[in-house]
Amino acid sequence: MATFLYKIGRLTFRRRRLVALVWVALLALAGFGAASASTATSSSFSIPGTEAQKAFDLLEERFPGGSADGATARVVFKAPDGQKVTDAGNKAEVGKIVAELKSGSDQIASVADPFKANAVSENGSTAYISVSYAVSSMELTDGTREALEDAGEAARSSGMTVEIGGDALQVMPHTGATEVIGIAVAAVVLVITFGSLIAAGLPLLTALVGVGIGVSLITALANVLDLGSTTSTLAMMIGLAVGIDYALFIVSRYRAELAEGREREEAAGRAVGTAGSAVVFAGLTVVIALVGLAVVNIPMLTKMGAAAAGTVAIAVLIALTLVPALLGFAGKRVMGRKARKAAEAENKPDAKPNMGTRWARFVLRKPVWVLLAGVIGLGVIAVPAASLEMGLPDDGSQPKSTTQRQAYDLLSDGFGPGFNGPLLVVVDTKGSADGKTAVDRVSQEIEGIGHVAAVTPATFNKAGDAATITVIPEDRPSSVQTEDVVHAIRDAGADIRSETGAVVLVTGATAMNIDFSEKMNDALLPYLALVVGLAFLLLMVVFRSLLVPLKAALGFLLSVVAALGAVVAVFQWGWLGSLFGVEQTGPIMSMMPIFMVGVVFGLAMDYEVFLVTRMREAYVHGETPGQAVVTGFRHGARVVSAAAVIMIAVFAGFIGSSESMIKMIGFSLAIAVFFDAFVVRMAIVPAVLALLGERAWWLPRRLDRVLPNVDVEGEGLRANLADGGPAGGERELSRV
């Protein structure tokens, strides 16, 4: 592989104008596709195989035209102090708004008058209008949303408080200025690392090109592939981080080759042949981790992972082709004067050891203490992970300044927390001899379950073979008590089915969230086994060792559990919550742990591959295990540290998002990368390698014969170059 990539590096360096033109053309085509694509009209959310999804499908079949998947909204009214919404003036205002909503858009399916639908609180202070739409929230027109937002203006002028909740007002998340700050921090780190504006700007430029192509393609295909609004945001987050890192690895190795006195084209070839090999395998681990999300069998998550994996693949291709091409344009300016002098000084035999060398030597002297400090420190931080509770965010997790959150609070105060998450019980009576009696039995059973505030009368469909019952829990949608209510109804439904033949199913947004969380929990261990297993095999091929890949996997698991502990402490317990803009604590978003595992595993392997391949390279060329560790840190510690700081800055930039899901993922990825890069890779890894010595690079002979030799460390490339191989053959380059 190293020899092939060497040829690619030299070829793209020589044909830099053509290569740059091709990438610019691809960016323009992707941008044109995104600009001309129709707006995504839907973002369906389905959980195959769950009871909530079966009930949802039954509703669409038995209640046609009921818009089971349509958007919903609740317009909540609170009368001024000393008044009631049932007072003549206030009642008239509410009636006007009901009429306005009915005539405000042709996308509305139904509007429920609160005075006819029993939607007035016991003390008369609060009421709400339920609005159902014939289309999903992503299909609502701007005019429909404006009509909803303007509906309460007249009532507000009369003194009533009017707030609007529901998914009808769902909008695209925005990340704010902190995302730009993350990129600015990355730029500063690159300038400090390279000491050259040209060298610092190159990784940023190529990463932005890659993200531009990836996000534009996602936008262009969003309508066709039914991609959610957060897909492009997550692809941008990951694409920026790995795009900068991969280019950083190539540029750093290129500068090291120049410092050794090689010509620019030869330096580009060697940089892509060696660091490029590490980039390919690091990228493969990220892609495996992201595509592996398909094992969860949730279409939305599968699409998110595939889209992000595509962006990572583009970042790898850009690092191998566009980066060496731009290095050709940069000339000697990629090495500033100070950087050139520093490199020359570092290559002298009597050179002063750099920070990476000094740290590696310290770890080699105290490996047991460093190992214990790292493991115990991460273990303490991981303790809160034992209290992990998972769920999906609702309007209660929105910022307090939003109308959705204020509507949520008004409903909780006026009717009880459970009104924000009603359960919909669907009864299929086709297999029952007496459907009405069976449905009555279901209602009675539910009324006898604890933590249930109200049960509405059953509503039958036209055919009379199905009925719906709305159940209002006493507690908020994300509470453990509400989850217990769902399971209790389902347990009672099993008995009713055996006795009457009627099938009882529970659905609704709250039940969907509970089923989603349980499915994510069930999928976590199989997903871990798949991703870690495949990556272990891949790293075994790269390092030709059993213990190094095992150490890499165990270290990753330690950093992930510690990151989960930090997430629980901040977002569930509220520790330092105000610092990160957490206004409402609650369960951790159920997809976050498995998504973090997928992303961080791939990213952690970036540092493992780049740092340890340098050690492996030194070991293969005759150095002792201890000397190889020092060599790896001398060449790689600064680059890996810079790459980690950049990645942390990019991820941390998304903590400023208005979307709680993006905020939580940004924090979790940033803290996980910090733990993995600076504690696991920089401390635990060299300590373990120091303790293992020669055994670290042991591989059974049978495996050695079976495993393909991909030559990541460039041993075959060096031998080939020493014999006058590819470097001297222009014809070989032209055939690549």
Image (spheres, rainbow, N blue to C red):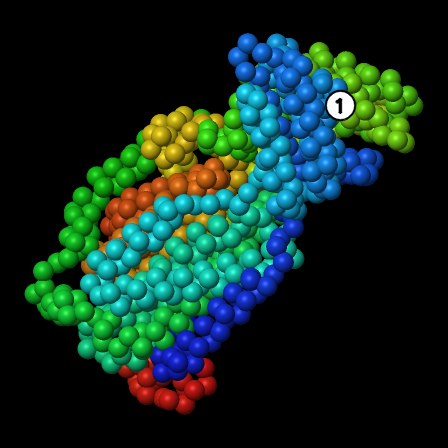
Q: Quadrant of the N terminus?
A: bottom left
* Residue to which mark 1 is pinned: 469
Examine the rendered structure and indicate whether residue 228 appears above or below residue 375: below
Three-letter residue code for mark 1: Ile
Examine the rendered structure and indicate whether residue 392 appears above or below residue 702: above
Camera sees residue 163:
yes
Is disc 1 surrounded by few (<14), some (14 to 19) or many (20+) residues within 10 Å? many
Task: Point out residue 527 in the picture as x, y percentages from the top left corner.
Answer: 54, 45
Camera sees residue 702:
no
Task: Point out residue 15 in the picture as x, y percentages from the top left corner.
Answer: 39, 82
**Relative to 251, 521 lies left or right:** right
Query: Residue drawn 60% across and 28% down?
Result: 154
Examine the rendered structure and indicate whether residue 408 appears above or below residue 16: above
Residue 614 found in image quarter: bottom left
Q: Quadrant of the C terminus?
A: bottom left
Query: Residue drawn 82% across and 38% down?
Result: 64
Q: Secondary structure at mark 1?
A: strand
The foreground one among 338 and 727 is 338
**Relative to 596, 373 lies left or right:** left
**Relative to 15, 46 lies left or right:** right
Report the label total.
Answer: 1
Task: Point out residue 122 in the picture as x, y percentages from the top left corner.
Answer: 64, 10
Query: Residue drawn 45% across and 60% down?
Result: 211
Q: Residue furthest right?
A: 433
Query: Residue drawn 49% across and 32% down?
Result: 402
The foreground one among 567 and 126 is 126
